[in-house]
Image (tube, rainbow, N blue to C red):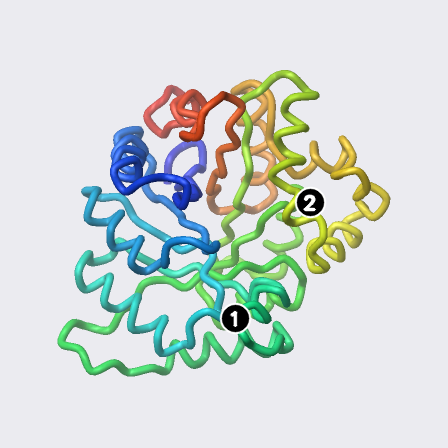
């Protein structure tokens, strides 16, 4: 793992052309980041996109962050993961999540108990035996987990738990629940911007899609942010969940999560610059190749 704990960049790609994706992938890899994580929104299909990214890189690992388990059944997910790892051995793995009720309903599914749904899905994907010539895909399975019950599911059935938009004290709680044998990944939004008003505005815009979601509202309330959720989130909420400021400030927040028990950090780079491309100043400053 890199000294700064950052093992990957979570980067959306739906807004880019294929040529632009290749440019971004090559630059992320050239900066020494070990992996690229790709979200599951409403554009390109994840498995196909992962294959494209892997073909455009040399050693970069690709992780789905996350793949909505309502979008593909366990058999389909196992087939996809096995096939991609057959093409690119040990360079692809699944990050899974139950998403939210709207994520199931828009696909025509009924929302099920998330703990039962994820537990059964993980048991099913582990049990599948595919009729393919390559060895069984043994790549790790990560799941998005914030609440105590889902963290327990991660400890029992998965290889890792991913947390997102939570304070460092949540990281300490997560480590206590999952124990020492389950990988704990903190997905951390970062913004290289020293102007408080601008940085918080960027963060509020990014968090706006999560603010109405019941799962996040309940989690934030549980962690003492119940009175901080109006008007896009208070300064206290933003400052607790998002790492912004100069390079030293961002590294300090990363260290807080690592000290609290995180094994690794996946960074979401918020862009404080103009233009649609990733904030290369941020990625260069926190590159595994940069001085500690």
Q: Which residue is drawn at 38% across and 19% down?
A: 291
Give the numbered dot on residue 60.
Answer: none
The 10 Å Cα crowd at callout 2, few under 14, some 14 to 19, many 20 or more, is: some
Question: If the image is split into quadrants, where does the C terminus sit?
Answer: top left
Q: Indicate the position of residue 44 as horizontal and vertical percent values.
A: 37, 54
Q: Indicate the position of residue 103 as horizontal and vertical percent values.
A: 57, 64
As measured in the structure, the alpha-carbon distance from the residue carrying label 1 to the one carrying label 2 is 35 Å
Provide the secondary structure element on which disc 2 rests.
helix
Give the numbered dot on residue 107.
Answer: 1
Check contact, mark 1 vs mark 2: CB within 8 A: no
Q: Residue at x 62, y 75 (%)?
A: 111
The 10 Å Cα crowd at callout 1, few under 14, some 14 to 19, many 20 or more, is: few
Looking at the image, which is closer to me, 230 or 44? 44
86 horizontally vs 102: left or right: left
5 horizontally vs 206: left or right: left
Question: If the image is split into quadrants, where does the N terminus sit?
Answer: top left
Nearer the N terminus, badge 1 or badge 2? 1
Q: Indicate the position of residue 148 as horizontal and vertical percent values.
A: 67, 63
Q: How many labels does the image show?
A: 2
Q: Quadrant of residue 81?
A: bottom left
210 horizontally vs 185: left or right: right
Give above or below for 7 relative to 214. Answer: above
Q: Quadrant of residue 51?
A: bottom left
Q: Nearer the viewer, mark 1 or mark 2?
A: 1
Give above or below for 15 relative to 193. Answer: below
Q: Indicate the position of residue 25 as horizontal and vertical percent values.
A: 29, 38
Give above or below for 228 relative to 31. Answer: below
Q: Which residue is drawn at 63% across and 33% down?
A: 203
Q: Which residue is label 2 attached to?
A: 169
Looking at the image, which is closer to me, 197 or 247? 197
Provide the secondary structure element on which disc 1 rests.
loop
228 horizontally vs 45: left or right: right
């Amino acid at each position: 793992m890199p000294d700064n704990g950052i093992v990957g960049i979570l980067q959306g790609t739906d807004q880019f052309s294929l040529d632009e994706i290749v440019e971004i992938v090559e630059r992320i890899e050239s900066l020494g980041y070990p992996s690229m994580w790709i979200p599951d929104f409403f554009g390109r299909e994840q498995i196909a996109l992962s294959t494209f990214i892997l073909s455009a890189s040399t050693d970069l690992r690709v992780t789905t962050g996350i793949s909505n388990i309502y979008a593909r059944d366990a058999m389909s997910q196992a087939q996809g993961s096995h096939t991609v790892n057959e093409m690119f051995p040990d360079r692809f793995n699944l990050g899974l999540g139950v998403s939210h009720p709207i994520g199931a309903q828009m696909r025509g599914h009924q929302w099920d108990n998330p703990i039962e749904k994820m537990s059964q899905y993980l048991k099913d994907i582990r049990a599948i035996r595919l009729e393919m010539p390559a060895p069984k895909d043994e790549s790790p399975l990560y799941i998005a987990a914030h609440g105590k019950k889902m963290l327990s599911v991660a400890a029992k059935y998965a290889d890792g738990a991913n947390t997102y938009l939570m304070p460092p004290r949540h990281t300490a709680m997560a480590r206590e629940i999952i124990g020492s044998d389950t990988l704990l990944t903190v997905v951390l939004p970062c913004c290289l911007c020293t102007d408080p008003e601008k940085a918080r505005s960027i963060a509020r815009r990014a968090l706006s899609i999560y603010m109405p979601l019941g799962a996040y509202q309940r989690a934030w309330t549980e962690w003492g942010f119940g009175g901080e959720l109006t008007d896009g989130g208070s300064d206290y909420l933003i400052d607790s969940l998002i790492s912004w400021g100069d390079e030293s400030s961002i590294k300090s927040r990363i260290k807080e999560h690592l000290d609290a028990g995180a094994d690794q950090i996946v960074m979401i780079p918020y862009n404080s610059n103009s233009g649609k491309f990733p904030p290369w100043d941020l990625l260069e400053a926190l590159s595994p190749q940069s001085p500690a």
